[in-house]
Amino acid sequence: VNAGDTAQRTDVSFAGLATSSLGGTATVLQSDDLNAENSFAEPDKVAPVTQKISVDKGSLEFEFPKYSVTVLRLKEGGE
């Protein structure tokens, strides 16, 4: 969760894992307006966006957008 008003770039380390080959998805729920909400008129105003991610040499660099909730799903060998 990034409840702040600026994006946060971070490096997530997976040191100690038996494998360095991890891949998966990041699903992000985010809006530039902290008070944004879905309605019948705008049912997709705030909607999750999924992107592919991969761990490179035991590390994942990721930028968590402002006002966001992110779910990282990783597994050995990829998606």
Image (tube, rainbow, N blue to C red):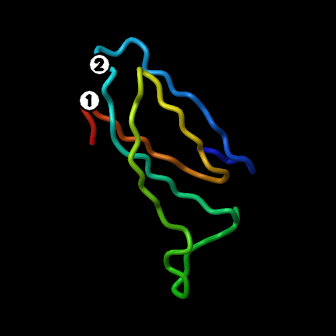
Count up the numbered dots: 2
Residue toward you, 77 or 47? 77
Q: Residue furthest left?
A: 77
Mark 2 crowd level (few <14, some 14–19, many ≥20, 10 Å Cα) = few
Q: Quadrant of residue 21?
A: top left
| Dot 1: element | strand
- Measured as percent of width and height from the top left, residue 49 is found at 46, 59
Mark before the other along the chain sequence, 1 or 2: 2
Residue 47, compared with residue 8, is above or below; it is below
Residue at the image position 38 percent from the left and 47 percent from the top: 52
Residue at the image position 51 percent from the left and 27 percent from the top: 12
- Measured as percent of width and height from the top left, residue 9 is found at 63, 37
Tell whether 20 sits left or right of 49.
left
Marks 1,2: beta carbons within 8 A = yes
Tell whether 27 sits left or right of 17.
right
Residue at the image position 58 percent from the left and 58 percent from the top: 30
Residue at the image position 56 percent from the left and 74 percent from the top: 45
Q: Residue furthest top?
A: 16
Residue highlighted by disc 1 = 76
Residue highlighted by disc 2 = 19
Residue 31, compared with residue 72, is above or below; it is below
Q: Quadrant of residue 75?
A: top left
Please, what is the three-letter code of the amino acid marked with disc 2?
Thr
Tell whether 50 sits left or right of 28.
left
Q: Residue furthest front?
A: 56
Give residue 4's mark: none
Between the C-alphas of marks 1 and 2, the distance is: 7 Å
Tell whether 9 sits left or right of 6.
left
Q: In the rendered image, which quarter contains the N terminus?
A: top right
Please, what is the three-letter code of the amino acid marked with disc 1?
Glu
